[in-house]
Structure formats: structure tokens, C-alpha cells
Amino acid sequence: MDQDRPFAQTLTRLRAAGLRPTRQRLALGRLLFDGGDRHVTAEALHEEAQKAGVSVSLATVYNTLHQFTDVQLLREVVVDSARTYFDTNTSDHHHFFVENSGKLMDIDGDKIAISGLPDAPEGTGIARVDVIVRLQGDLRS
Amino acid sequence: MDQDRPFAQTLTRLRAAGLRPTRQRLALGRLLFDGGDRHVTAEALHEEAQKAGVSVSLATVYNTLHQFTDVQLLREVVVDSARTYFDTNTSDHHHFFVENSGKLMDIDGDKIAISGLPDAPEGTGIARVDVIVRLQGDLRS
DNA sequence: ACTCTTAGTTAGAACAATTCTAATGTGTTG
DNA sequence: CAACACATTAGAATTGTTCTAACTAAGAGT
């Protein structure tokens, strides 16, 4: 009945972004934005949706992830040539990447300072600076 | 500039790394290491080899690139989810990446300083810190 | 509510980069 | 130079992702 409520937040976000609030966008949005910052791959989110009883095709997961990225609800993180990660934290920040587990963790943007960065070459501008701290070893928490 | 032994340098490197100096490894090594620092993809190197009249299969290019990486003759650079780049500069350094042309450029490691890096999480160690400066726009003069 | 129009979803085919397989060829050692 | 371990190869297989074309649902207007 009251199933409407939990989607309120996502609904607002979608509206603000000018995306039609469809069943699958709402469901995926809820999985992504309810709870803290997340790092997901398309496959992982698809699986998660299935488990949550939401039927969404993998194609839609990819579409949605890209649309969300286009409207800055998500950010793409390139750390692994094998798969693409999407980050619900769209603020300026960096990452730890545990190479053997594929786990990503945020590093606050204002914790880190980079100095000595050369100017962008003629005819180009800096779109973004990514710092990736690659970690080795398991973290069994 | 010794015409006699254009492969001498590569041969030495291969020997030092304990890799058998086969025709294709020598040829690829020459393309990679003669001349300044380079950033190549497997496909690009394969094509280059063909044009230079060296017949190497794509599988061998991939094998060789990985073997060279294993013995630190090359370094892998992850900047683009679509393809893998290999860098002949194995020293500590960072990169400019021109997003629309796919061009990579080195930034000297000692030009840049990063401060405020958090400690690696329990049970892990820092394997490497990558700084990628993503550029937008074409550079042509 | 009903219908139009347009945008969104879908299954499966297509794709591109990379890896694998199993057959053949080559460098090195004794 | 024989013998074996290691390399190379073509092509098939695999993987993550994108495309296609048919279907479905959302929002506007009535």
C-alpha cells in the first residue's frame, strides 16, 4: 500500500533531472540511493535487483546507469579494464581500489591536495583529476 | 645507430628478464623501446608491426605485452574502459589523458606531490598511486 | 477514463577487446 | 643435432557492453 513512500526520494531526483519515473528507474534508484555511498557494476546491480524481486533487464540497467550518469546522479569510475564502476558519490573525490577483491572506497576530495600539476596542453582543458590508490592484499573486515 | 645490431638493446633486456629472445619478441621490443617513451594498445602495436613487415599474430602481441609487463619492461595504464594501454615508461609517473582522441602523455612523477593521502586500510598495502588528468578538447596546433 | 504520442523496456543478436585452445614451430641444452 | 620445453598461431570462445526492432507504459489532451 504504502509502497509509494520509499520511492519519494528517488522520485524527486528523477523529476529534478527530467527523467520519467518509470518502475525500473525507481527501483534501481532506490537500490542505488537508499543508504550510503555505493560503487556498483551493471552486472552486480542487475543481480541485486533480481534478488530484490524487481524484474529489470540487463539492457535497462545499462541504460539507466548511463542516463543517471548523464544527469550527474552517478559518476563513472575507471579503475579496472574488465568492468565499469558507477559511483553514487558525485562530489569531488578519489578512490582506493583493492585490486584482488575489486572493492572501491572513497577518499574525500578535500583530504587530498595535489601540487605541481602541469598546465593542460594547448587546446585542451582539464575535465577532471582522478587519483587512484591501488591496494594489494585482502581486507577481511 | 649501429646498423649491425639494432636488436642489441632489446636482446639485452630480454636476456636480463629471462625471456627467450624470439623473432617476434625482438621485433616488438624494438618497436617499443627504440625511440622515446611510448603508449600503445595491443591492436595499435599489432598494426604497426604489420606495417613494418613483421608478421606477428595478435595473440602473440597480447602475450608479449603481458610478459613484458610481468618483468617490468612495460607498465599497464588503466584510463579507458574500452582498451588497455601499455607504457614503456616504467618509472614512477602520472598521465594526461585526452578523452576524445585517446592520447596519453606522461607527467613526471617528481613534478607532482600528493599530500593528505589516508593510510591504507587494515590488511592492505599501497601498490601504486595513479594520477590521471583527464583532458577535453582536441590538440592540434 | 480513453486515446495518442513519445519515451522506455526488453530479449536476444551483435560487437569489440581480450583470452583460450590445441596444433605447429623454434630456441637452447646436452 | 636430438630432444624437450617454451613460443607462436589461427581461430574459436568468452566477457562486458551496445544495438535492434518489437513491445509496453507514461503523460498530455480530450
Image (tube, coloured by chain):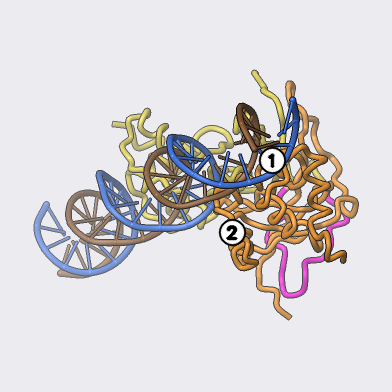
Chain colours: A yellow, B orange, C blue, D brown
| Residue sitting at the far top | A141
- The residue shown at (65%, 52%) is B24
Q: Quadrant of the N terminus of chain A?
A: top left
Q: How many marks?
A: 2
Amino acid carrying mark 2 in the image: Ser
Question: In this orientation, does residue A8 appear?
Answer: no
Callout 1: chain: A
- Residue picked out by circle 2: B55
| SS under mark 1 | strand
Q: Which residues are magenta?
A: A114-130
Q: Nearer the viewer, residue A19 or A79?
A: A79
Please tell me which residue is depicted at 69% across the width and 51% down the height of the picture.
Answer: B86
Identified at 70% across, 56% down, the residue is: B27
Which amino acid, by three-letter code, is at mark 1?
His
Subunit of label 2: B
Q: Position of residue B48 (x, y in %)?
A: 63, 64
Residue nearest the observer in this picture, A38 or D14: D14
Secondary structure at badge 2 equals loop
Queried whether the magenta region covers residue B57, the answer comes back as: no
Q: Position of residue A125 (x, y in %)?
A: 72, 68
> Is label 2 on the same chain as label 1?
no
Q: Nearer the viewer, residue A138 or B113?
A: A138
**Circle 1 is placed at which residue position?**
A95
